[in-house]
Amino acid sequence: MQKRVAAIHDLSGVGRCSLSVIFPTLSVMGIQVCAVPTALLSAHTNGFGDVVLKDMTSYIPEALRHYISQEINFDCVYSGFLASEEQVSHCLEFMDSFKGALRVVDPVMGDGGKRYRTYTDELCRRMGELVAAADIITPNVTEAAILLGMPYPAAPLTVGELKKILVKLSQKGPKIVVITGALMADGGVCNAGYDSEHNAFWRVPYEMIPRSYPGTGDIFASVLTGGILLGDSLPIAMTRATAFCEYAIKTTFGYGAPVRDGVMLEKCLPMLVEQRSFTEYVQL
Ligand code: PXL
């Protein structure tokens, strides 16, 4: 049977992030996406000035009631960018309503050591509640620091420091923690994962490109989620997601396309249907 995901994220018209990239990415992987929009935006909040934002908070519980009344089921509830504090409660209700569903929380809050401009202290605090209810979380280093109430790391992380951060985050609730974009003291950058049930740590290195395209965290979390739903092990799903993001970033960088437009996803999607192995991971 095809897998079905409730994707609780915003829809940004321009800038290739959130539902605009989650839909095509999971669809190409053969997974059905049911959008639960948290907000409609003319563009993402990073580089397009004063964007138009329509908050969809009141819509979410009504949509949930409708799905329950129709006995619709989801294999996964996957949340991301939220537009209000109440939406945390709505996401928790969604997760509670579909018992066997995999709970994936991408705790979207910021990047590069800075919070996104719509994220208040209270929304960041409440994001911790959502993380506690998740099976899998996918913070970047900025979001990991916010969740743990620690300063954004000033220096690259040692393996020991990164493992400690992964373990501390999993102690908040999620069985699996994947941190993206970790600069390492022993060189390079990687995505790092921890599976607390198997006490396994994984590291997937990738080549750093000196651009930070919006939406790559959403693409990473989507490929990772898709891989897991289709039966990948954690390190293989992480490698699949890392390889795809690296390819999309290098494609975009090569063309010199504007950063704020995000990655050239449309050109890259065919990679997700190719049969190839994703075994470049190592133990962290
Ligand atoms: O990709 C994260 C994201 C999602 N949604 C909106 C954003 C951002 C990052 O800037 O602005 C609206």
Image (cartoon, rainbow, N blue to C red):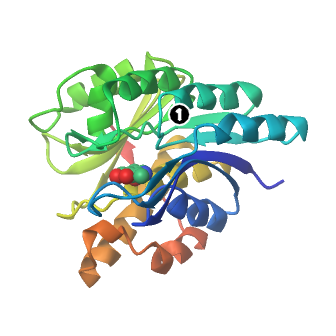
Rendering quarter of residue 51? bottom left
Nearest the eye: 283 or 153: 153
* Residue 280 visible in rendering: no
User: Going by the image, does 233 lie left or right of 278?
Assistant: right
Q: Examine the rendered structure and indicate whether residue 19 appears above or below residue 200.
A: below
Nearest the eye: 266 or 66: 66
x, y (%) of residue 21? 51, 63
x, y (%) of residue 210? 17, 63
Going 34% across and 70% down the picture, which residue do you hit? 261
Q: Examine the rendered structure and indicate whether residue 66 appears above or below residue 163.
A: below
Nearest the eye: 88 or 209: 88
Going 59% across and 52% down the picture, which residue do you hit? 227
Rendering quarter of residue 111? top left
x, y (%) of residue 23? 60, 61
Outermost residue, bottom side:
255
Outermost residue, top side:
171
User: Going by the image, does 230 lie left or right of 193?
Assistant: right
* Residue 205 visible in rendering: yes
Going 29% across and 64% down the picture, which residue do you hit? 48
User: Going by the image, does 172 lie left or right of 255?
Assistant: right
Q: Secondary structure at mark 1?
A: strand
Outermost residue, left side:
155
Q: How many marks?
A: 1
Residue at label 1?
136
x, y (%) of residue 6? 68, 45
Q: Examine the rendered structure and indicate whether residue 138 appears above or below residue 122.
A: below
> Within 10 angstroms of label 1, few (less than 14), some, or many (20 or more) residues?
many
Position of the C terminus, as image quadrant, is top left
Nearest the eye: 163 or 282: 163
Tag 1: amino acid:
Ile
Going 30% across and 72% down the picture, which residue do you hit? 250
